Image: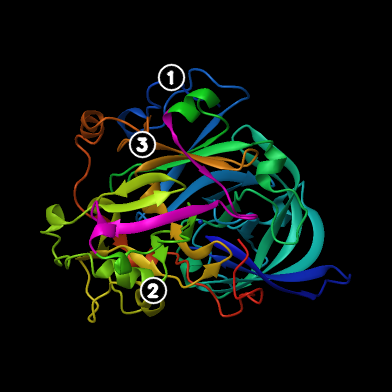
Amino acid sequence: AFELETSRVHASFGTQNPMKSSMKFLVAGSLAVSCSALKIPNGKIATPISTVGSAVHRQTLHNYMNVQYYGDFTIGGQEIQGIFDTGSFELLVRSTRCSHCVHPTTPYDRNHSKTYGENGTLTKHVFGSGPCVSMKGYEEVNVGPLKSKGQSFWEIIDHKIQVLDTAKFAAIVGIGPNFAYGNQDKTLLMNFGVKEFSICLQRASGADGVMTWGQEVPTDYKEKNYARARVIGKHHWVTRMHNVSFGKSPLTDNFANVPCTGGGCAAIIDSGTSLIAAPAQALQQLSTQLEPILEDCSNMHLLPTLHFNIDGTDFTLPPEAYVMRVTAETIEEQDSIWEQLFFKPKVKKVNMCMPAFMQMDMHSQHGPVWILGMPFFRFYHTTFNRETKTMHFARAAPDCSAHPFHSSDEALIALNAGAPKGPMDIDVGKIVPPAFSSQIDDSTDNNVDL
């Protein structure tokens, strides 16, 4: 998910509490520590052995259709499933206040809580997949041993978001680096006292991911062995990205067909976005560098590696990361999502392969905006630190164990031995897209404030 401020009006339930309108883009213990790899044996979450600094909690992110990864938490003593989303900053929960809503999973019910605090402020969130009206309140929120009393949150009381009618999650848990736009309520990270956390998704189709609350490895080890990127956004985990291309030496071939040259682009590292999102112009440039992908994926072994530079460090993603096989019982009812797939064929088909890119045209003070979503987290174990305003990246093995970023070629071959080589199966109907609304406030030099 990706959240931006739009505009504000005043409204209340019997008071003069401000009502704001915001825009969001959805697509939403201890730890064993050593100086080699952080291991998840047999695809399961590792048993804690030791900690670095304060307590560390490791949480499973359950995988639904390879496009929704959600974790369990409690709010008001009720267990709820939520997307832990680096692209937003607030806690938004599907609620029984929405009497006409479809509830595919258990919603939050304030009447079953002993810790609910009333507020009454209304907010209209405008998502890429539809609008949502919610009401502000306060609750006790727990993730494992972590606890926040009086946490501000938003109950959904009305929405027209199709994916919520079938989603495996009932909440969006914002874990952005700062306060929400124009809001001084402490975020969940702040109230938990968590300055650093990490996310990784296992590569196998249907395999779970893992989120670690707290510091996994010593700082000096991380600085020495992980790639580092500065966070340049006020509200988002955004950094600079340059020279996106297929192939090793694109600049020597055709400079005009390489996105993010010159001043570069803004890249949001977003755990709540199902695919990779980019401007149409950039995707058109990339299309000139990529041979057509056969519908049956039989030429995947011939496809090039995707190269890009994040804040001075070169990154790559193999075809397994950027090729998807479209699966669904039917895609006839998914027109809005289908239209956002940039490389889609003219005729809708299932069980066919295509590049996993979505179109999102947005410009910021740091340049055109890209979103590196779930495909990125399958190959890079990513650590976020809101205190130092940095992100650190380790190489992720297929089981999500973290390895030094600058590994030798031999080590990388061994690291990826046995890794899945085919495309990722994606149910188009379950994608929560990062499309944006026309209501977005870009009045300042036509730039979105990240």
Give the magenta part as a residue range. Answer: 225-253
Q: Is residue 423 among the parts visible in the rendering?
A: yes
User: Pointer 2: what residue?
Assistant: 280
Is 267 left or right of 5, judged from the image as shown?
left
Amino acid under disc 2? Ala
- Report if the CB atoms under discs 3 and 1 are less than 8 Å apart: no
Name the N-terminal-most of marks 1 and 2: 1
Q: Position of residue 341 (x, y in %)?
A: 34, 71
CB contact under 8 Å: marks 2 and 3: no
Three-letter amino acid code of the residue under disc 1: Ser
Structural distance between the alpha carbons of marks 2 and 3: 29 Å
- Display colour scheme: rainbow
Q: Say above or below: 33 vs 60.
A: above
Judge whether residue 116 is colored magenta: no
Quarter occupied by residue 13: bottom right
The residue lying furthest to the front in this view is 252
Residue receiving disc 1: 34
Circle 3 residue = 395
- Residue plotted at (63% across, 65% down): 449
In which quadrant is the C terminus drawn? bottom right
**Would residue 231 be counted in the magenta stretch?**
yes
